[in-house]
Amino acid sequence: MSASLRTIADLSNAGLLRGDAASLEEVAARYAVAITPEMVRLIDKSDPADPIALQFVPDARELDVRTEELTDPIGDMRHSPVPGVVHRYGDRVLLKVISSCPVYCRFCFRREMVGPGHDAPLTGEMLTRALDYIAGDKRIWEVILTGGDPFMLSARRAGELTAALSSIGHVKVIRWHTRVPVVDPARVTPEFVAALKSSCAVYVGIHANHAREFTDEARAAIARLADAGIALVSQSVLLKGVNDNIDALEALMRAFVENRIKPYYLHHGDLAPGTAHFRTTIAEGQALMRTLHARASGLALPTYVIDLPGGVSKAPIGPLFHRAAQGRDEVLGADGEWREVI
C-alpha cells in the first residue's frame, strides 16, 4: 500500500495523468484517489480507453454533476438506525466497519462517504451499539460487512468481528464485500483467511469489472479463500467503456467462474455524483444480458439489478424471455427466435 498512487502529482510522475491538472486537482479534492501497484501495472498507458485506467484514474468529467444525481443514491443514511448499520431489508443489515479502501473507484456510489477525512473505523462504543442493535433484532439472519472495504481490517480485528457476530444466535450468514483479493491480493494472508472462519455460513463477495483484473496474484488470493471452504460470489457494475460489450462482459463472467466465484449481481450504474459518463441505458444492459444468456453457461449468468433511488430496494431488470402473444405463451430461444410453448 505504501506505493499506491494517491495524488495528482503521483499520477503525473507515473505517466497516468489524463487531462488538465487543475481540473483533476479539483476532482481529487472532492473524491478520494488511490491506485494500488497491482492496478497500476495493469494499465496500458498507450490506450486512452484502457478499462483499468477508466475505473481508477481521476477524470475531469467527474466534475459534471447532474441534477438527477444524489450524494446518497441508495439511501444508506435514511435507513441507518445506529451509526455503522444500514437496515434496508428485514432479514439482513449492512455493517459499515471502515471507510477506507485500497483503491477508490471513480464510479463508487459511496464516493461522498469514503476516503480520508470520512468516518473513522467502527470501534469501541460505536461498534458495541451496532452489535447490540443486531443482537436485539431477531429478524436479522445475515450481516453484510462493507464500508469502505472490510478486508482493510487487520486479521485480529476481522477475527474479533467474526467472533462477535457468530455469537449472536439468530445471525446465520456473514458476508464480506471486498475489492482486496483483486486489487491488493497480498493482504489476503493465511491469517486473514483464518479470521473469517465461523460457525455461521461465510460468504465473500468479490468485486471486479474486467477480466484483466484477475492477475496471477489475484487468482492465488482467491484460491486461498476458496480452499478454506469460504463461498465466493461476485459483484460487478455495468460500466460504459469497461465492460459494456459482450466480449468483455462474457470474459469477466467466465473469469469469475474459473476462479470458483459464482456470478451474483451485475449492477446498473447508480446515480452517484459525477458518474454519468459511466452509465449505460437499461435497454443496453438488457441486450447484453440476452446475448450473454445465449453464449454462456448458466453458471456464468449474474442477475442484472438496479438499486432504486432512496433505498427502496434492489430490483431485477434482466431481459424478458416470455411473452403472451394473441393468447399464446411464447419463449425466446438462444437463437433469438420466439417460439410457442404449451
Image (cartoon, grey):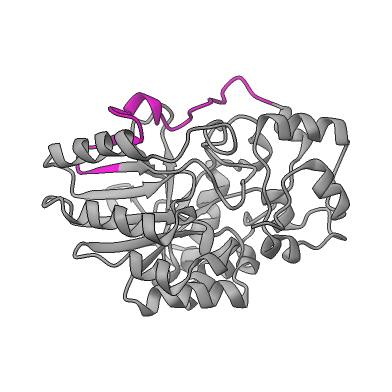
In-front residue for pair 312/169? 169
Left or right: 248, with 264 as reference point: right
Which quadrant would the C terminus be assigned to in this image? bottom left
Residue drawn at 74 percent across, 47 percent down: 57
In the picture provided, is 133 more to the left or to the right than 188? left
Where is residue 182? Give x, y as percent.
56, 64
Question: From where the camera sits, is residue 174 visible?
Answer: yes
Tell me which segment is drawn in magenta. Answer: 65-93
- Note whether 90 is above or below 301 in the view shown: above
> In front here: 200 or 125?
125
Q: Nearer the viewer, residue 129 or 321?
A: 129
Q: Is residue 91 magenta?
A: yes
Image x and y of residue 233, in percent: 39, 63
Residue 82 to residue 325: above or below: above
Taking the magenta stretch, the answer to whether it contains residue 40 is no
Q: Is residue 289 above or below residue 307?
A: below
Q: Quadrant of residue 51?
A: bottom right
Q: Position of residue 240 (x, y in %)?
A: 66, 48
> Magenta stretch mostly in which secondary structure?
loop
Out of 68 and 58, give the one closest to the viewer. Answer: 58
Q: Quadrant of the N terminus?
A: bottom right
How many numbered marks appear?
A: 0
Q: Image point 61% across, 51% down: which residue?
A: 103
Q: Position of residue 97 (x, y in %)?
A: 39, 43
